[in-house]
Amino acid sequence: MKKRLLIFEVGWLVAGALLAPAQSITTICTLTNVFGGSSGPAYPAAALTLGPDGNFYSTSLEGGGGLFIYGTLFKVTTNGMLTLLTNFNVANVESPYGGLTLGPDGNFYGTTRDGGGNNHGTVFRVTPDGVLTTLVNFNNTNGSGPMAGLALGPDGNFYGTTWGGGANGYGTVFLAMANGALTTLAGFSGSNGGNPGASLTLGPDGNFYGTTHLGLNNEYGTVFRVTTNGTLTTLLGFNLTNGAGPDASLALGADGNFYGTTHAGGSSGYGTVFKMMTNGILTTLVNFDNGTNGRSPYAGLTLGPDGNFYGTTSQAGSGGFGTVFKVTTNGALTTLTSFYGTNGANPWAALTLGLDGNFYGTTYGGGTGNGGTIFRMELPPDFIMSPTDQFVGIGGSATFKCQPFGTGPFDYQWLSNGVPVAGVTGNSLTLSNISWQITNAQFQVLITNHWGSILSSPASAHVLLQPTIFDVTVSGDDQVMVQLGSYPNSTNRLWATTNLSLPLSQWQVVATNIADGNGLSQFQDTNTIGIPTKFYRLSLP
C-alpha cells in the first residue's frame, strides 16, 4: 500500500447524505475517489495554476486508474471540461502536494514529495500537453520530500523548499534551474525552524519569504527571509497564542506587508489570519472559532482586485467541511460560503483568480464522486474602482467611471441625487454641456448581479471657477459659433485675433456677453469670411 502524509483529518462522505442550501459556489467538476475505480484525477491538494490559454492546470494526489496510484496532472476549463495530461508513477514521480508554476518558457514546473530515483521526491517539468521530464532527484543529503510548489525568481530560476533532509534533517531551501541543476541555499536545524511545507513568496526587496511548520526549538512555526545567495534570517517564531503551524505560503499585500494563515493556535486554538511586516512585527487579524467562520486554514491567502484577501478553511463552517472567506487588511472577516459535502469538502489549497474575474479552487474531498471537486466562487459585486469627483469648466463634459469585481454579468443603475438617470446602463456616465446647476449634484452607481448589489459612495462634478470657451464650430458659410461658459449672470468679454504672436494688448474685443443663470452664452462671429484662422479668448471685464 502506498504511504501517505495526511496533515489533517478528512471527513469521509456519502454522496447525497448532506443537502446544501442555495449558496454562492458552483461545482464545475466533480472527481471520483480511487475506490470507485477512477481513471481520472482524485483528491486534489494543490491550487489551480492559470495558464496563458485561460485554462487551469494542476495536480491530484491520486487517480489515474487502479488503487492507491501515484497522482496525476490535469487541465480544466472554466466550464469544467477536464483533460488528464499524465499519470505519475513511482518510477518517476509521486505524491504531488504542491501546485504548478508557469515558467518563462511556457512549460509548468513542480515538485513531488515522493518518487524519483532515490524516492526522496523530485522537481519536474511538464508541457501544456502533458510531456513530463524529471529534472531533479532529491537524495536526502540535498533535501527530501518537497511539499510545496516552486517560486519563479527574477533571475528566471526556481526557488523552493524541502520538508526534510539536508544537513540537519529539518529541510532545505534550494535553487533549481530549468536544466535540472540544483543548488542547496540554506538548511533548517530545528533551532531556527524546521519542515517548511509552503512555497516561497518573492518580496519587494528581492528576497524570498516563507514559513516553517516547526518553530524555534521545534515549537510552533516560524516566518523566515532568505536571500538568493542563501542567507537565512528567522523573522518571528509563533507562540501558540498568536498562532501555530503555518503551513501556507505568504501573500504580499498592496501595502508591502505579508499576510498569511496558521492552521492552529490563536485565542480559540483553531487557527488565525495574520499580518507581518518585513521586520517581523506580527499582528493577528482573525481568530477562527470552529464555528460558522471555519477552522484550520491550511491554504494561503489570495489578493483580490478589490484589495481584500480571499482564502479557505479546511473544516467547520455551517456545513462542517470548510469555508471560503474574505478578509480585509484590518481583519474584518466575511464567510462567503460553506462546504456541505456534496458540493465539496476540506479545501487544502488557495484560490486562483481566473481571467473572467471569478475565483476558482479545489476541495480535497466531497462532491458526488467523493474524490474532490473543482469549483468556481460566485461573488456579489464589489468595486475595484468607484466613481470619483470630476473637475470641469462650464460647458465641458465630465465622465464618471466604475470598475466592478465579482461574478458577471452586471447591471448598472446610475443615480443623480438618488434619482435614477434614464438610459445609462453601462459602467460609465458622461455629462455634457456642464452648467452651474450641477454643482450640488451627487452621482452614484448601483451595481447588481445574481448574488447581490452594491452602491458606490457619492461623487460630484466640481465646476471650475473661471470663464471658458468650451466649443467652437464653423458652419458651411464660414460663420463661427463660439460657446461660452462663465459665472451665472456675469458680464464677459470675448476677444479675437488672427495672429497668436501679437501681445494680448493688441487682441480685439468682438463681443460683450451676459451669461445666463447657468453661466452659459454664445456668440456668432460673422466677420470670418476670407480669414483662414481666428483665435478667441474670454475674460471677465
Image: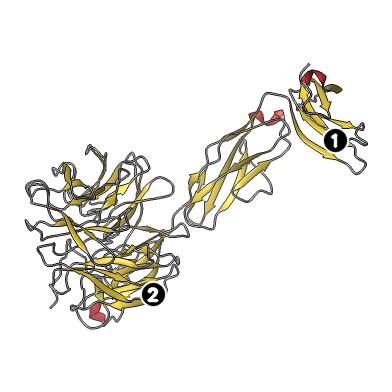
**Image quarter of residue 365:** bottom left
Q: Which residue is the site of mark 1? A: 481
Q: Which residue is the site of mark 2? A: 82
Which percent across, then down, holds residue 319? 30, 59
Compared across the picture, whether 210 is left or right of 305 comes to left
Query: In the image, which disc is placed on residue 57?
Result: none
For label 1, the crowd category at 10 Å Cα-Cα, with few meaning under 14, some 14 to 19 and many 20 or more, is some
Q: Which is more N-terminal, label 2 or label 1?
A: 2
The N terminus - image quarter: bottom left
Please say which color scheme the image uses.
Answer: secondary structure
Which percent across, then down, holds residue 188? 11, 52
Compared across the picture, whether 482 is left or right of 34 comes to right
Which percent across, then down, holds residue 25? 40, 61
Q: Is residue 485 visible?
A: yes
**Residue lying farthest front?**
501
Compared across the picture, whether 100 is left or right of 1 comes to right
Residue at x 83% of width, y 27% of height: 497
Which element carries disc 2, helix, strand or loop?
A: strand
